[in-house]
Image: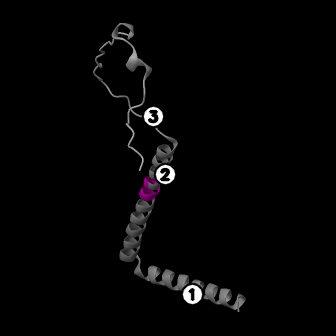
């Protein structure tokens, strides 16, 4: 088996006499008063823009749904006959459209 080697590498300064070595100076670290923010990376900017777009779309959709519910309840309370007639006409048109689509693809 091979003999273990030391982890220390040879340094030419190890064999120099003390008189030839440069003097060592002790430098104390300065305290950090305010940490600078890290610069934003492209991926974090894209993620932030995506989150903003998602929140904007989510807010717009929830506002539209709330308005539609409010309008539907008002219509149901004030004009129930027109509401039933509107649903019937929409169902008839959807049925005719689906029948034509099915006939086209048979």
Give the residue pinned by disc 3: 39
Which element is circle 2 on?
helix
Crowding near pointer 3: few (<14 within 10 Å), some, many (20+)?
A: few
What range of the chain is rendered magenta?
55-60
Crowding near pointer 2: few (<14 within 10 Å), some, many (20+)?
A: few
Q: Is residue 106 magenta?
A: no
Residue 103: image location, x then y, percent: 69, 91
Residue 27: image location, x then y, percent: 31, 15
Measuring 46% from the left and 45% from the top, which residue is drawn there? 44
Crowding near pointer 1: few (<14 within 10 Å), some, many (20+)?
A: few
Q: Are marks 1 and 3 in contact (CB under 8 Å)?
A: no
Measuring 39% from the left and 44% from the top, which residue is drawn there? 3
Comparing 33 with 91, the one in front is 33
Instruction: Give the alpha-carbon distance from disc 2 to disc 3, as whole Å.
Output: 19 Å
Q: Earlier in the sequence, mark 1 or mark 3?
A: 3
Give the residue pinned by disc 1: 92
Q: Earlier in the sequence, mark 2 or mark 1?
A: 2
């Amino acid at each position: 088996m091979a003999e273990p080697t030391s982890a220390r590498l040879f340094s030419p300064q190890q064999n120099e006499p003390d008189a030839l070595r440069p003097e060592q100076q002790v430098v104390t670290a300065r305290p950090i008063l305010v940490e600078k923010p890290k610069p934003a990376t492209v991926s974090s900017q894209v993620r932030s823009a995506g989150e903003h777009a998602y929140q904007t779309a989510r807010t717009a959709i929830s506002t539209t749904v709330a308005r539609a519910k409010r309008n539907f309840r008002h219509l149901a309370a004030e004009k129930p006959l027109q509401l039933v007639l509107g649903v019937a006409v929409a169902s008839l048109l959807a049925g005719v459209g689906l029948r034509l689509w099915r006939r086209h693809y048979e």
